[in-house]
Image: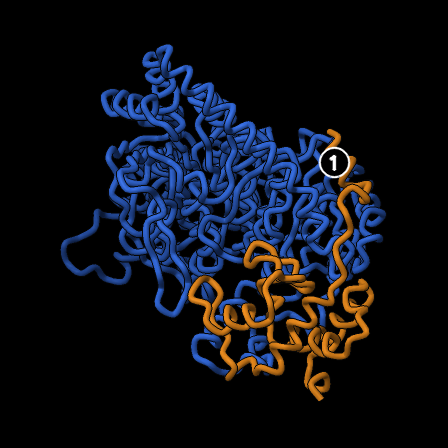
Chain colours: A blue, B orange
Amino acid sequence: MTDKSKSKQAVTKVDRRKFMAGVAVAGAAVVSTEAKSAILPPGAPAPAAPSAMRPSTVMAQAEVATASVSAPAYPGTQNGKPGSDYMVDVLKTLDIEYIVTNPASSCRGIHESIVNYGGNRMPELLTTMHEESGTAMAHGYFKVALKPMGSLCHGTVGLQHAAMAVYNAWCDRAPILMMIGNEMDANVRRPGVPTTHAAQDPAAMIRDFTKWDDQPGSLQHFSESMVRAYRISMTPPYEPVLIVMGEELQEGVPEPGHFENFSIPKVALPTPPQGESNAVRETAAMLVAAENPVFVVDRVARTPAGLALMVELAELLQATVVDQGGRMNFPNMHHLAARGAAAIRRADVVVGMELTDFWGTVNDFSDTAHAQQGPIVREGTRMVSIGTGDVYIRANYQDFQRYQPVDIAIAADAEATLPSLIEAVRMLLDGAARTRIDNRGQAARDAYNTARSRVAADAAASAWNASPISGARLSFELWELIKNEDWALVSRDQSISNWPHRVWTFDKYYQWIGGPGGAGIGYGLPAAVGAALAHRPHGRLVVNIQNDGDCMYAPGALWTAAHHKIPLLNVMHNNRAYHQEVMHLQRMASWRQRGLSDGSWRVATTIENPNVDYAKLAESMGVAGIGPIENPNDLAPALRRAIDIVKAGEPALVDVITQPR
Amino acid sequence: MHRKTLPGFVSALLASLFFAGAAQAADAAAEDGAAVYSRSGCWGCHAYLGQGGRDGPQIAHTALSYEAFSTFVRNSTGDMPPFTARIVPDADLEKIYAYLQSIPEPPAPETLPLLQDVFSD
């Protein structure tokens, strides 16, 4: 029997070393060279199979160690290809451009492999200052690149940091390939953190808001699980997944020749589920017969095709579309685009597509001491839901609202269902229906033009010349400078009263990416950096209207933008407060009849005394900082300077002192 | 001496309001009203110049009489919580009303070049 065959016999008898004959050598494992020599002298027979009897110390050591490790060329070094190189081989098949990481000892094996074996390309490591920031970057990146990024975190500690960003991505249907290091085998753990903070089931803490996880026991298992994770993550509804990578798996060196049968499965992404044909036809009939059909959409357009299909369907029926803004579902300047609940109040058919909150869409809730609530739709209004919410739902950490009864519930991916719904509608259109639809379209055009004509007057009346600067003024000044560029907005705009959506023309899929999903503050800045990274190859001018409170959660994302030369125009919406909480505290004080006039609502809600100097903050991290800008007449020159910097390939920040919203 | 108790940001805010020409009214009640408006947090929903926004309507130059204004503020049952005399005394509410009426009218949109450029697209 050769040494090699002996080794194979040995490893097959010790499950966790199935592919790792040389693991005991790895990383100055607990079994030192001297100790191992004492246990397994050269030429000794392979260790016996584990005994049913409680093993002696010597036998236990023999079971976890292995024989026939070829002598390294240099003492204290390894020969051969380590496990983490195989992991990189797998990652390279998945078209992963980037992995965000905050460096961690439990990931040192794959970290080194990505850099030295993989050449730090496909994937490339991005340095982040916090796991939550890194994961939020991956979240923002996906919504532009439409492919997932990896997020490599330290085991227990790093994953806890990342948890909120994972929850945001889960609520927002964004896939992220989470990867963490862990060391299950106490016998080979290094002293210190790996031993103290290892976990039996590290994925447990985020399992309620990830779609799948696994802790592979071998490199072949890793190969299959990583490919499976990618596929599951990229099957609508898109969600984060987690792979736990054992340190021994990363750092061990499989015996030469052992991986002759190592394989990496091909990825074939499943087609998403489409609506059942009878339910789709019934919905189409309802829409064609309706006087005022309304589509309410949230995360319908997973891809640019979804946007085009939504326009096609709406125009076919001349039906109003209320876009809740989870994605770029519908052009905001289209005559069928509606804002607010007025269209829903008039509707006789409401089709809710990929909504998180259908109940809140067709009901009104007034945040009073008595919590007034009630339907806003007319009696007899028929309702249809299309979405994956019923296909994929969890009980503990929730992402659904109150139960809304509907007439037809189609459990399917909305974008995938749109072609058959369009076709079914088209087949039902007759002369009478077309006349009704044409009349409806003309009425929609008239209403749209009336609404548009009010925008200029509203903007002028919205503290146009005031300091602090109004959201309207900020939005118009920005639009003037970007409207002839290939631009994208990578932040929400509700904090400035949605002025960009009232002024700017959003008609391309990549110009809007929605929000965090889970309402987790600290998403905004890193997600903007991640989205800007995805825009970078296209040379787009990327704008982030950045809330001050959100920025202070994760300002280190600015450093990442500077370090990796990610062009991004950050415009601070600096109202010096967590303003929503200002209003909540005022409301509570008002209900309880106390403490309002003394300004006590400022306690733990405002960010002042001292004021944060965001320009200096940016400068300290290598990002060009301009401001604070308080006079609206200074705004355009400041923005021009910043845009010049961004066009040169660097991030910039303009600190603008703003009205509350 | 209300202002003595105000945080720095409020003082800066008040100064900026004057910079903006918003509180140029000579009326002392209106000037006091700006401070009360700020201290009472009305701007939280209605913004610094009462221009309104996502969370509250415009209240500068309200068409309501003081009596109607007061009745609404004291008895609101809608999204705006009721502000009773216990937390905003009558004297303060009168000053707030005076301030809201004193805010200069906004510029006409046709006089603002930026708006013309945008809507000529």
Number of numbered markers:
1
Residue depicted at x 17% and y 61%: A54
Q: Position of residue A429 (x, y in %)?
A: 36, 13
Q: Which residue is mark 1?
A: B118
Left or right of A81? Residue A651 is: right
Secondary element under disc 1, as helix, strand or loop, is helix
Q: Say above or below: A628 vs A451.
A: below
Quarter placement of the N terminus of chain A: top left
Query: Dot 1: within a 10 Å radius of its alpha carbon, few (fewer than 14), some, or many (20 or more) residues?
Result: some
Q: Say above or below: A440 vs B60.
A: above
Residue depicted at x 48% and y 70%: A587
**Residue furthest left in the image:** A52
Q: Position of residue A548 (x, y in %)?
A: 64, 60
Quarter placement of the C terminus of chain A: bottom right
Left or right of A442? Residue A373 is: left
Left or right of B106? Residue B80 is: left
Residue A46 image-quadrant placement: top left
Any part of residue A43 in sight: no
Any part of residue A158 in sight: yes
The one nearer the camera, A142 or A490, is A490
Residue B11 image-quadrant placement: bottom right
As shown in the figure, which amino acid type bears the numbered disc 1? Val
